[in-house]
Image (spheres, rainbow, N blue to C red):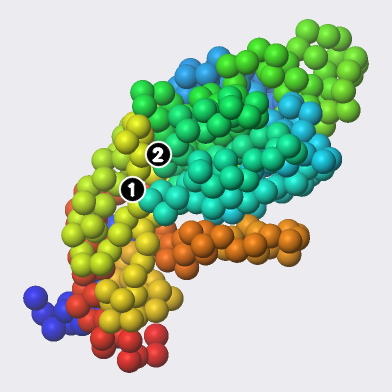
């Protein structure tokens, strides 16, 4: 190895990986252009679109749910899910604080109160015991988030929902293709919400879908998302003050073109994710998050690790990430606890959530679509930083 290759790239050495080697996202498939052209020329662009109907059917089929309503995004899908249960003022909904703010914002927008329960340090998913401790007579629903695409402990949450008669809504924004046992997530609880925003594992830039196996809920969700219309009623009959959350045919076309690739992407992320984690867990002091015994498959929207500066001569995470970036690996910090946002009042810090927000290191889903050798090189880059961590600590990087 040359002296330059051995020296940390952030200090002028050669990087382990050339950034151009990584895949990029969104997937620029020629099929997407064709699907969009087909909508422009042949389809309705909104209401009545064949592309929207096709996508709802394809995604429901893939995700093993009976009913699906595609929407403009996942935030409104969460809102529609809560509204479908008539959850509103005076009601409480238990959620993790290690999530995107939308999980809480949807609850606030229906007039209810988000109640934060702590997460399980193994997976950073909502902890069922902490959830049970937060249940009271105002509790109406639980929203476990399959964080990073790693399924929450759905069996425990189904038991809790049954025991306390609560709605169980899956925030599956990050989890297309994830499996708990032999079932895909999304319709294991009463209903589930997915996101197709630009960072997501399947994307139309923006977009979402709500899935359920419950016909009655499907009917209610239709009213909430489609201006209060019923599934079978006349166009100008509005039985509920619903809003318009309808997806456009263009978003649906972009998603349809990706559907034949989805299972291949999901498998590749899982294979590369597991392979990378095998390598990373061999690095002294490195900890990748785990999964539940019943987890069938992690969708790996994020590969999440808990960084321990103690194993890197005390190198602060910010400097570690800067040094890793210079080596050609984009890994990032992530969430702040949702309860720390200015729009939340009176919420106590939760110890495991605080620790997760301190330690988290995220690797994004599309990097797990890279060739296998880049997983080896990612681990090599981290080892290189560890080897030079004492030197890096002393540098202003
Ligand atoms: C866990 C989680 N929930 C909800 C959302 C909201 O999704 P959207 O951006 O499609 O509204 C996101 C998106 O980042 C998310 O990650």
Where is residue 297? Give x, y as percent. 35, 34
Q: Secondary structure at mark 2?
A: loop
Where is residue 162? Give x, y as percent. 58, 25
Res. 290 mark: 1
If the image is split into quadrants, where does the N terminus sit? bottom left
If the image is split into quadrants, where does the C terminus sit? bottom left
What residue lies at 63% left-to-right and 45% top-to-bottom? Answer: 134
Where is residue 144? Give x, y as percent. 55, 40
The quarter holding residue 384 reads: bottom left
Q: Nearer the viewer, residue 63 or 49?
A: 63
Q: Residue furthest left?
A: 1
Whole-angstrom CA distance, mark 2 to mark 1, is 13 Å
Tell me if label 2 and label 1 are in contact, CB under 8 Å. Answer: no
The quarter holding residue 260 reads: top left
- Is the residue 127 above or below the residue 240 in the image? below
Question: Going by the image, does 293 lie left or right of 143?
Answer: left
What residue lies at 75% left-to-right and 20% top-to-bottom? Answer: 220
- Is the residue 161 above or below the residue 367 in the image? above
Question: Going by the image, does 187 lie left or right of 78?
Answer: left
Q: Is mark 2 within 8 Å of ligand 1?
A: no
Where is residue 396? Give x, y as percent. 39, 90
User: Which mark sits nearer the N-terminus, 2 or 1?
Assistant: 1
Res. 299 mark: 2
Q: Secondary structure at mark 1?
A: loop
The quarter holding residue 107 reads: top right
What residue lies at 73% left-to-right and 64% top-to-bottom? Answer: 342
Residue 265 appears in the figure: no
Mark 2 neighbour density, 10 Å: few (under 14) some (14–19) many (20 or more): many
């Amino acid at each position: 190895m040359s002296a330059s290759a051995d020296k940390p790239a952030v200090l002028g050495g050669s990087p382990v990986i050339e950034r151009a080697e990584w895949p990029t996202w969104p997937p620029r498939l020629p099929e997407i252009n064709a699907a969009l052209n087909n909508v422009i020329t042949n389809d309705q662009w909104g209401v009545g679109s064949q592309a929207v109907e096709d996508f709802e059917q394809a995604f429901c089929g893939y995700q093993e749910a009976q009913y699906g309503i595609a929407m403009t995004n996942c935030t409104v899908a969460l809102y529609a899910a809560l509204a479908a249960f008539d959850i509103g003022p005076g009601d409480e909904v238990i959620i993790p604080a290690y999530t995107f703010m939308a999980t809480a914002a949807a609850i606030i927008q229906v007039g209810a109160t988000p109640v934060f329960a702590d997460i399980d340090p193994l997976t950073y998913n909502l902890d069922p015991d902490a959830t049970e401790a937060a249940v009271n007579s105002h509790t109406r629903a639980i929203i476990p988030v399959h964080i990073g695409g790693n399924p929450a402990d759905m069996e425990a949450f189904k038991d809790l929902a049954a025991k306390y008669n609560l709605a169980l809504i899956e925030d599956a924004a990050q989890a297309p293709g994830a499996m708990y046992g032999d079932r895909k997530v999304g319709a294991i609880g009463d209903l589930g919400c997915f996101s197709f925003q630009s960072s997501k594992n399947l994307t139309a830039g923006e977009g979402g879908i709500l899935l359920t196996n419950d016909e009655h809920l499907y009917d209610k969700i239709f009213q909430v998302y489609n201006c209060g219309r019923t599934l079978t009623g006349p166009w100008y009959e509005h039985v509920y003050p619903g809003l318009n959350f309808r997806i456009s045919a263009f978003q649906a076309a972009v998603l349809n073109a990706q559907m034949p690739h989805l299972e291949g992407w999901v498998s590749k992320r899982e294979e590369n994710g597991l392979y990378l984690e095998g390598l990373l867990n061999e690095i002294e002091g490195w900890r990748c998050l785990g999964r539940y015994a019943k987890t069938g498959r992690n969708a790996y929207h994020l590969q999440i690790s808990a960084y321990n500066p103690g194993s890197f001569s005390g190198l602060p995470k910010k400097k570690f990430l800067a040094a890793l970036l210079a080596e050609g690996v984009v890994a990032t910090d992530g969430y702040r606890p949702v309860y720390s946002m200015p729009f939340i009042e009176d919420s106590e810090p939760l110890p495991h959530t605080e620790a997760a927000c301190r330690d988290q290191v995220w690797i994004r889903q599309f990097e797990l679509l890279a060739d296998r050798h880049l997983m080896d090189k990612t681990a090599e880059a981290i080892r290189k930083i560890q080897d030079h961590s004492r030197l890096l600590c002393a540098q202003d990087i």
